Image (cartoon, helix red, strand yellow):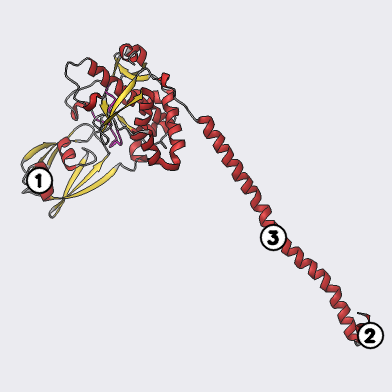
């Protein structure tokens, strides 16, 4: 390096010295900035990664803490369910049966108190049904000597394997939440005058529930019309519209429509559901129209668009008893499951199977 220095002109030497003075600090600065670029993202991201891992661990711990295990001796008896697809009978302890019915009948993401109310309805249904079977002289018409079926004829029921397949990765939290609801109400049913009720329930009201005799033949004192304002606010099933051809309606209802829809005359119940409608000169019940045309509700309006009829419905289901979305709305407002069932089943109370149905409770 020394020999090159002597060969440089004086002004060049000064420039070179100046360049050397800046080159080293610049190099350090560049390296420093490069290190910062590499290190800072790691510093920023690492706490989030660690936090995410900690959060996941806390979720796992929480899930394990909330896990509920139902023992076979928690159930006073088992229920024999006729599986409509396999044509086989599945025997399952009562409380496990209730878990699987609730899982099949109500969304698991509903409020816990609503799920508890549904658990009471499911348990009450099977107790009431089995007591009626025991007291009936009629032969059991359910296939395979089962107690009941797995369809809407009784209560929808899915096996644990079917629920795992349906829910996939959500299975654990959903089934644990439902088991929590069932365990919290274990052995409880809804009664009226010390007898288990017929715990009718449905998805979504039109703003009111329906008196039982307006949809079914029997008038039951606990199945009275009550206001259910929560449904319209929270149920995605509150409004629906179905368009059918006039020809399809005529065929389904056995009528001949020769007049405009404006002349269709309806009578309505106090809950604003169609009691009767006159179509094609024939008076038809709102229930028949709903069931034969597969409408969501008996609260419907009809308009005619040339050769089509438009049915606009409010609510989803027969409308008698407990509204599921109404129950969820009540739960969101802080009501308990006992508040819910005693609201929708007027004059009813929560009782124990052991005292209400001791003979059934002793069945093994």
Residue 218 x, y percent position in the rendering = 18, 23
Element assignment for label 2: helix
Q: Which residue is mark 3?
A: 38
Dot 2, how many residues are within 10 Å of its Cα: few (below 14), some (14-19), or many (20+)?
Answer: few
Mark-to-mark CA distance, 1 and 3: 75 Å
**Quadrant containing the N terminus in the rendered view:** bottom right
Residue 335's quadrant in the figure? top left
Query: Closer to the N terminus: mark 1 or mark 3?
Result: 3
The image's mark for residue 251 is 1
Q: Are marks 2 and 3 in contact (CB under 8 Å)?
A: no
Residue 145 x, y percent position in the rendering = 24, 23
Residue at image location 23% in from the left, 21% down from the top: 220
User: Which residue is at the front of the view, 105 or 216?
Assistant: 105
Mark-to-mark CA distance, 1 and 2: 113 Å
Dot 1, how many residues are within 10 Å of its Cα: few (below 14), some (14-19), or many (20+)?
Answer: few
Name the dominant secondary structure of the magenta segment. Answer: loop
209 falls in the magenta region: yes
The image's mark for residue 126 is none
Can residue 280 be seen in the rendering of this structure? yes
Q: Which residue is mark 2?
A: 6
């Amino acid at each position: 390096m020394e020999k090159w220095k002597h060969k440089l002109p004086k002004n060049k030497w000064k420039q070179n010295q100046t360049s050397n003075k800046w080159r080293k600090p610049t190099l350090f600065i560049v390296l420093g900035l490069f290190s910062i670029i590499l290190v800072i993202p790691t510093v920023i991201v690492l706490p989030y990664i660690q936090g995410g891992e900690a959060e996941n661990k806390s979720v796992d711990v929480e899930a394990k803490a909330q896990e509920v295990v139902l023992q076979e001796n928690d159930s006073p008896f088992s229920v024999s369910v006729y599986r409509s697809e396999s044509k086989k009978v599945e025997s399952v302890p009562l409380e496990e049966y209730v878990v699987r019915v609730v899982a099949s009948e109500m969304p698991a993401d509903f409020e816990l108190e609503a799920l508890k109310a549904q658990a009471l309805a499911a348990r009450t249904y099977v107790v009431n049904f089995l007591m009626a079977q025991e007291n009936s002289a009629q032969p059991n018409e359910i296939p395979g000597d089962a107690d009941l079926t797995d369809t809407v004829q009784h209560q929808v029921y899915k096996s644990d394997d079917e629920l795992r397949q349906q829910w996939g990765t959500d299975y654990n939290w959903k089934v644990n939440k439902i088991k929590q609801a069932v365990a919290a109400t274990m052995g409880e049913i809804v009664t009226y005058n010390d007898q288990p009720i017929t715990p009718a329930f449905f998805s979504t009201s039109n703003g009111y529930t329906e008196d039982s005799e307006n949809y079914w033949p029997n008038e039951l004192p606990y199945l009275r019309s009550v206001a259910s304002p929560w449904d319209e606010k929270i149920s995605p099933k509150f409004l629906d519209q179905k368009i059918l051809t006039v020809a399809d309606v005529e065929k389904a209802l056995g009528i001949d429509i020769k007049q405009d829809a404006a002349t269709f005359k309806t009578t309505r119940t106090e809950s604003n559901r169609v009691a009767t409608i006159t179509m094609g000169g024939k008076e038809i019940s709102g229930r028949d129209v709903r069931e034969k045309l597969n409408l969501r509700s008996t609260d419907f309006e009809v308009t005619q668009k040339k050769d089509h009829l438009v049915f606009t419905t409010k609510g989803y289901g027969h409308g008698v008893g407990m509204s599921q979305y109404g129950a969820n709305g009540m739960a969101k407002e802080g009501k308990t499951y006992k508040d819910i069932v005693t609201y929708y089943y007027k004059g009813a109370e929560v009782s124990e199977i052991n005292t209400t149905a001791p003979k059934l409770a002793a069945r093994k």
